[in-house]
Amino acid sequence: MLHDLIFLVLGLALLVVGANYVTDGAVAVAKRFNVSNLIIGLTVVALGSTLPDMVVCVESAFQNRPAIAVGEVIGSNIFDLLLVVGIMGIVRPWRVSDVMRYQDLPILFIASAALWVAGDTVLFDGAQHNVINRSAGIMLIVVFMFYMWFMILSSRKSKGVAAVDDMGDDSLTTGESTAGGGGVVAAHGVKGELSALKSEINALRSKHWFSWLLIVVGLAALVVGGNWVVSGASGLALKVGMSQAMVALTVVAIGNALPDLVTSLTATLKGASGIALGNIVGSCIINALLSIGLSSLVIPLKADAIGFVDFITLVGASALIWVVPMLTKSGRVTRLFGIVLTLLYVGYMVFTVIRG
């Protein structure tokens, strides 16, 4: 058991390190081809932030452990939407921007609902088992492609990137325009700017080959880390008598999502909750559409242990974050709402553990 736990922890650490190396190297290469910072943020950085989840999903599919793939994505997204957003609201109430309410959160709800329809075949197709087959995976990937096209199109409509001040009075902007403030475009745009700046600093002390070396080393770390996470999770489930789905929904999902919690809390304390929410929403969309879509192309993802409660919790969390702030005059995530989200996550975890 200790051996499996060590493999799991080391694997999670390698995933984080590998994702950072791949992202840094890819940003440096993109800058050399004069790709704009905003496009870098929407593509390289956005995908880089979800690489740990994506690698675990695909590696699980290759090792014929589909329950881990589906459970990791659903568990990680529920962790982000209920616990992380809930704690953000408790720490500091903040306003959800108009772009987030009318553009990004509806897309998140659609992505979560698409994953539910694709995965809960017992409910929607009358099948005997829940399985995400290849045709459903292709559908998810197509939706993801439309999402990326829409994000890039939206970014071109604004001359800059804005982040809405969390208290909802004014805008704190980076760029020339406040269009798109506080949304996924803003979050990834700011991350793209920071990554590009980091790349320029690194370029002063490194050569062109170093960027490619970062990518190669990062990819190697991702492959090894993903293999260790899946192997460790499977072994841990076998030793303690839990299902692989439960380990994925809890231990693996929380381990992969912990950096999101730290980053989001740091941003909230610095008054940038809009950027933190944009990062969370963007990651959840990519996880639900691309990570599961790619994994299902490897093998059909049979996930009998992932059922109605898991899917409805994910879709319900997406709906709550979208609808509840619109029902208030200020459009804020209040401390009371944050407490409710946190308690919902605790309740879901209790149910998951009891279910086994």
Image: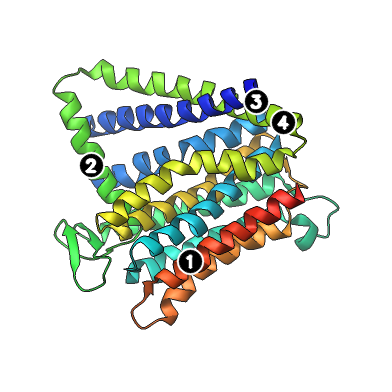
Q: Amino acid at mark 4?
A: Asn
Place of residue 349 in the rendered image (x, y in percent of width and height, measured from the top left): 63, 53
Q: What residue is at 22 percent from the left and 37 percent from the top? A: 196
Above or below for 174 versus 262: below
Quote the CA–CA distance across marks 3 and 4: 11 Å
Q: Helix, strand, or loop for circle 3?
A: helix
Q: Position of residue 237 (x, y in %)?
A: 72, 33
Residue indicated by mark 3: 231
Do callouts 3 and 4 mark residues in contact (Cβ within 8 Å)?
A: no
Q: Which residue bears the numbered disc 1?
A: 339
- Report the residue marked by disc 2: 194
Which amino acid type is shown beneath numbered disc 2? Answer: Leu
From where the camera sits, is residue 36 visible? no
Q: Considering only vertical position in the picture, is 231 above or below 327? A: above
Label 1 vs label 3, nearer the camera:
1
Mark 1 / mark 2, whichever is N-terminal: 2
- In the picture, residue 115 is in which quadrant? bottom right
Sequence-first tag of 1 and 3? 3
Which one is nearer the viewer's eye here, 212 or 34?
Answer: 212
On the image, numbered disc 4 is attached to which residue? 64
Q: Which mark lies nearer to you, 2 or 3?
A: 3
- In the image, which disc is placed on residue 320? none
Q: Amino acid at mark 1?
A: Ile
Frontmost of labels 4 and 1 is 1
Is disc 1 in contact with disc 3, using a CB cutoff of under 8 Å?
Answer: no
C-alpha gap between disc 1 and disc 2: 32 Å
Label 4 to label 1, Cα distance in Å?
Answer: 38 Å
Q: Quadrant of residue 234?
A: top right
Question: Few, some or many C-alpha atoms within 10 Å of disc 3 (few <14, some 14-19, many ≥20)?
Answer: many
Earlier along the polypeptide chain: callout 4 or callout 2?
4
Sequence-earlier tag: 3 or 4: 4
* Nearest to N terminus: mark 4 or mark 1: 4
